Image (tube, rainbow, N blue to C red):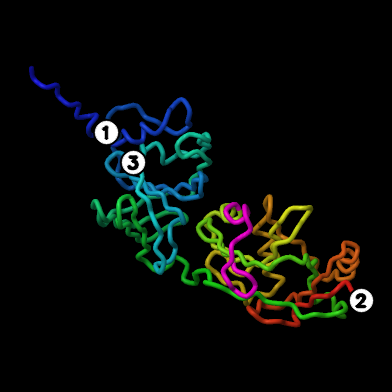
Amino acid sequence: MAAPKKDASKKDDKLADYRRKRDAAKTPEPVPPDQALPKGDDDTFVIQEHHARSLHWDLRLERDGVLVSWAVPKGIPPDPKVNHLAVHTEDHPLEYAAFEGDIPQGEYGGGTMHIWDRGTYETEKWSDREVMIVMHGSRVSGKYVLFKTRGKNWMIHRMDPPADPGFEPLPGKLQAMRPAQNKRLPRDQDAYGFEFAWGGRRLLAYIEGGRTRWTDGRARAVDGPAGIGPKLGESMGARPVLLDGELAQVEGRETYLIFDLLHLDGHPLLDEPYEERRRRLDELKANGPRWQTTPWFPGDGEAVRDAAHAQGLDYLAKRLDSPYEPGAESDAWRLISRRR
């Protein structure tokens, strides 16, 4: 008896792995039936921000009727000086280029997904070990190469200069600016902003690709407060951010209290006046279950003094026009003790 013939369509089914991992009855993701693949122009890309067990970005490139896919834990690198890991995953159906929604917890890839960028691309090289493309999106444009390193691990590298000519990466470490001790309010209160001093542990938070690393006020690497770093990083998405603040007890919970913004979206803010940095920090809306942007009060020193004394706190006066001076003890910032 002749051996049964193999079903070539099954053998060549590029979406078999994708279908095997998903139950169409349980997930809102598109799960096309086992049939011939549609054919496009091999020029569509999509980048999806995926809040799964850990935040990452999925880069998908249309190729031969499917979306060839990589999970990029830190997002698409904006600077050619830095390569990011890209983990090759299963091919996805073309319909996935329009997918946004909540994948149920317990299902493969459970979590929220939304489209971070999409557009067209041109292929300059495509092999089993190297993919070179030029992307044209609203957030990502330029020439990139993906190259295989080991197993499913690839790296993604930007070949063009940064799209923003003024882009600067986050500093590796930065010493905190310190206030000078003082006993009374400044006379020219209109020139100052006033804050409460919470008496916590000074921490700088360096956030990039949804991940957070911490240094203390002397720029020494430290372990972050348990349960805060990952969620704080995730809340910033792909934005590179450097925050200054302190870890203190607020209503019985350890909370990261943020009072300055030193770097945002590839631009250092150290030379910007305190008033502008605080305005930008307020716009960032950095508030969550265990992190908060602290209030500040321009020109309202007496009210802050009285409220601080009522709560048993010290308070600070910061010149509105003062830059951030890393590592310096500066009279532009004054720590005023409640002990008169």
Residue 230 colored magenta? Answer: yes
Tell me the CA gap for discs 3 and 1. 10 Å
For badge 1, the amino acid type reads Asp
Query: Which image quadrant is residue 196 in?
Result: bottom right
Please name whichever residue, 39 or 261, is drawn nearer the observer in this view of the structure: 261
Q: Residue furthest top?
A: 1
> Residue shown at 91%/66% (left/top)?
306
Residue 152, image x, y percentages: 32, 50
Camera sees residue 128? yes
For badge 3, the amino acid type reads Asp
Quick one: label 1, few (<14), some, or many (20+) residues within 10 Å?
A: some
69 relative to 225, above or below: above
Query: Nearer the viewer's eye, disc 1 or disc 2?
Result: 2
Q: Residue furthest left?
A: 1
For badge 2, the amino acid type reads Arg
> Residue shown at 43%/57% (left/top)?
76
The residue beneath circle 1 is: 13
